[in-house]
Amino acid sequence: MTEAVRQYEPVIGIEIHVQLATRTKMFCGCELSFGEEPNTRTCPVCLAHPGVLPVTNAEAVHFGLMIGLALGCEIAPSSIFHRKNYFYPDSPKAYQISQYDIPLCTGGRLGDVRIHRVHLEEDAAKLVHAGSSGRIHGAESSVVDFNRCGTPLVEIVTEPDLRSAAEAAEFGRLLQATLRRMGVSDVNMEEGSLRVDANVSIRPAGQASFGTKTELKNMNSFRFLERGIEAEVARQEQLLAEGGTIQQETLHFDPEAGSLTSLRSKEEAHDYRYFPEPDLVPMAPTEEMLVRARAALPELPAARAERLERELELPADTAKLLSFRSELGDFYETALAADSDHPRRLANWTINELTAAVGDGDPADTKLEPPVLARLVAMVADKQVSASAAREVLAVLIAKGGDPAQVIEAQGLGRAGEEELGDIVDRAIADNPDAVEKIRAGKQQAIGALVGAVMRETKGRADGGEVQQMIRAKLGE
Amino acid sequence: MSDLLGLTAATQAELIASGEVSGAEVFEFWRGRAAEDDLGAYLWVEEETPADPGRLPPVAVKDLFCVEGVPSSAGSRILEGYLPVYTATSVRNLQEAGAAVLGKTNQDEFAMGSSNENSGFGPVQNPWDRGRVPGGSSGGSAAAVAAGTAPWAIGTDTGGSIRQPASLCGIVGLKPTYGAVSRYGMIAFASSLDQCGPLTRDVTDAALMLRALEGRDPCDSTSLGLPEAVTLPSAERLDGLRFGAWGLAEEGLDPGVAEVCRRTLDRIEELGGGVQEIELPSAGHGISAYYVVAPAEASANLARYDGVRYGYRSPHYDDLLGMYENTRAEGFGEEVKRRIMIGTYALSSGYYEAYYGTAQKVRSKIAQDFAAAFEQVDFVVTPTSPTVAFELGERTADPLAMYLSDYFTVPMPLAGIPAVSIPCGLSEGLPVGFQIAGPAFSESRILDAAYALERTIGFEGVPVP
Amino acid sequence: MIDRDQVLHVARLSRLRLTDEELERMPGELSKILDHVEKMDELDLEGIEPTTHVVELQNVLREDVPRPSLPRERALAGAPDVADGGFRVPSPGGS
Ligand SMILES: [Mg+2]
Ligand SMILES: [Zn+2]
């Protein structure tokens, strides 16, 4: 088994469907649905009544262009929609309007991964299991809710450039952060506004051609994506090691059981009978449309991370975190604009102390103002307040707002002065002769007991490192 | 009031405008006429006179136009009882111009047919000879206007479905340029070909109705409207106009029909027009291209009739596949199923290029033929139908023979250009239609030429018993 | 030419259940139509672009402005089988 793992190289490409955050659907004026009662966001067009016609949402095209430009794609001078024909209750027209051989964008790159294409299409309806129906002799029945039907989607397809499950998940996170930063989608995987499929194959290391690929459908978190790919790679390796062959099929990963099940239906092989949608005319982005899309692009996470690392000399991981969670990066950079003396310390406070307090939330939603954080961090740097006391101050500022100096004053959290601290250290030495003995005998760890005593006494208004230095000095170490 | 019967819609509109008769009286009169229809032309007739019927006479509407709250089934059992929740733009335009909906007219199911025998609700009889077909697919609209149970009507033309029944019933039928009239609310047959247009007693009425119908519609991405307002025709002469005659030597053309059409060419010359024979080398392949493109698009357009959201659902099923297959097998008629099969086959994996791809190239060739012709002539003229109205049942056993009824009318929609059919005489006591086609958006010029000819021909309508 | 198996395949793709009589009749009937259709191969189509749209329009777009949706009762009014505020169907894959 270990041998096999070394012999094969995974080849992974991913396909991402993103629901666009427009106000209305792709081809009709119904508002997008956010958990409304079923079938309250429908009209003749999205219910595919006889005689209706689609009309393309300009904002969806705009978002599509923004995504294409963000990913460095080539924008097609003229692209068209096709009909993709299949019968299923979630597809009221029995065809999906989608782009086929002339998509809006082709080529491009995000990080090290090449983008194959980016195209526009419409989402399907939702099927809800309804249990047994008396009407059909106890047969299982489902109920169709067309609220989601027609939601604008962008499908992003990568080249098979990913070589491990971890790389795939990492790429997915970067793409998610990028799209979120652009404001074109909610990119929420649990709610399905971002859906990921992976095409997975393996090949002997060093071989240029690809093996047969399988498709992993609809994983609702990047963690599951990673685990699903790992499981599928392992399954393929084992199959080949046992002399078997890989079947082209679609698989579902069950994250709880860690198992893969084939979704291959007993239906005939798909024959989508694509043909150009006669109800729509070509989209030929004008210079004006491109200028508008370009102007709408913010600095994207990859570029921001690179800039923070280069200009502020932040560690790569810190720069990346501030960029992937742009709300943190925005807070950080606003704070930094107020006081630019301590970029690294401020970054650490942002990604450590601030995130510890707000979790996945946005610090801008708290009472804390970015310049106030900058001031607090400056006071720590200037030793006006100890780090541990500053943490308490931060908690107050987040909850109630206000000014750090006032909070310190009001709560008596000001840093212990040299003299006061000296007295406290002397007392600690006097009160702990055993520890002093051990330190003198070379047991360095014993100093912790003395530091602890001082910290308790100062209620955190002193800095641990400094206390330690003072103890050593007093003990003549 | 019976004197309204012999009047054109334009004349009735003048009477309403001058206050000689009220819109309500006109509506009432036609409602009574429509209710007496015994040709099978109507599937539904309005029972109440609207509060404000408007300043134009009411209009008979082909069943495949959606009218809010009015049964609209496109002649199909699969939509029996379907009540649209919205009204087609073309119908709304007519209502806004002052023409109320008089009733819904019978048609070939989903506009697939040339005889109206493919209706899910029974055939329509030709008022000239009840043993004969009125043509199709807008057979009910044509028969109603010809028989005087409607002052005028709208229909749809995909491969000839306005012009051919107009020809067989001895009335005027106009297929506008693709994009001139909104398709929103017209139950789709073949989206790249379908156009709505008037079926009227004379050319002036056709112009009057086109004026109300045309216009860019934000609900139809392929609609443009006409570049200039439609003028009412007034030409008396055809001086300086060049007419290119096509198809008079075709094998399948009935000699009687050819003879009447030749006489019409003579009249063009008498009016000062020039006539020359022209070649449309690819137009003869129009039927082939049409019977790929139209069924292919139809196979997708008709896929929505699945028994889920509206319309018929078979009671015989025990799973989803069974529900789909039985609903569609029971709800659709023979011809519709045949075309869905052809269209699905033509699009299916491995056959797309050979059929659909090739047919779309043939369309380009036909459009090139017309473009070349319009370098030499102002209009292309042809017989509308190769024969006069044929007997009910005569062609039902031979689909291909039925398809060839559209030989002269199919090339124009394939190229997207407008064409009108006007009655030009009788052969064997039955009307013969003469077709005038022009470049895209030349409706006003086509109607002007048709008007001049109409005046010299002096065609009398169906002898009303 | 289209044979019986192809007719069955296409009928399945089209979701049409054919009767024995139709299955008997259709291969011949459709073949005759297709034979006629195939005559278009006589044309020289070298270098000819296919027509997808006869109107020269592009970028027909709609502003992203909501329009009222249908009240649910109206959306469901014509449905053959309604349950739980939705359109009921036999479950896909189940029977
Ligand atoms: Mg897709
Ligand atoms: Zn809608």
Image (cartoon, grey):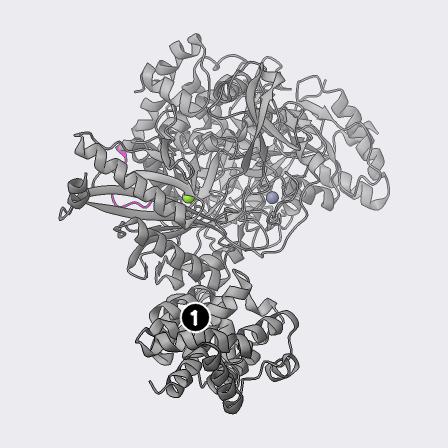
Q: Quadrant of ligand 2?
A: top right
Residue A466: x and y in percent read 43, 83
Depicted A463 relative to depicted B355: above or below: below
Magenta-highlighted residues: C42-50
| Circle 1 residue | A299
The residue located at (43%, 12%) in the rendering is C22
The percent position of residue B303, horizontal first and vertical second, equals: 50, 29
- Left or right: A369, with B369 as reference point: right
B165 vs A347, left or right, is: right
Chain of the residue under the numbered disc 1 shown in the image: A
> Horizontal placement of A402 versus A359: left or right?
right
Distance from mark 1 CB to nearest ligand 1 atom below 8 Å: no
- Amino acid tagged 1: Glu
Q: Residue at x 36, y 80 (%)?
A: A311
User: Magenta part mainly helix, strand or loop?
Assistant: loop
Residue A207: x %, y % from top left: 13, 46
Question: Residue A316 appears in which quarter of the rendering?
Answer: bottom left
SS type, badge 1: loop
Q: Is residue A300 visible?
A: no
Say whether residue A34 is visible.
yes
Is residue C18 found inside the magenta-colored segment of the image? Answer: no
Q: Is residue B342 above or below residue B99?
A: above
Residue A383: x %, y % from top left:
48, 86
Q: Observer-nearest residue: B175 or A75?
A: A75
Q: Residues within 10 Å of mark 1 (few under 14, many from 20)?
A: some
Q: Is residue A71 above or below residue B296?
A: below
Quarter of the picture holding the N terminus of chain B: top right
Q: Quadrant of the C terminus of chain B?
A: top right
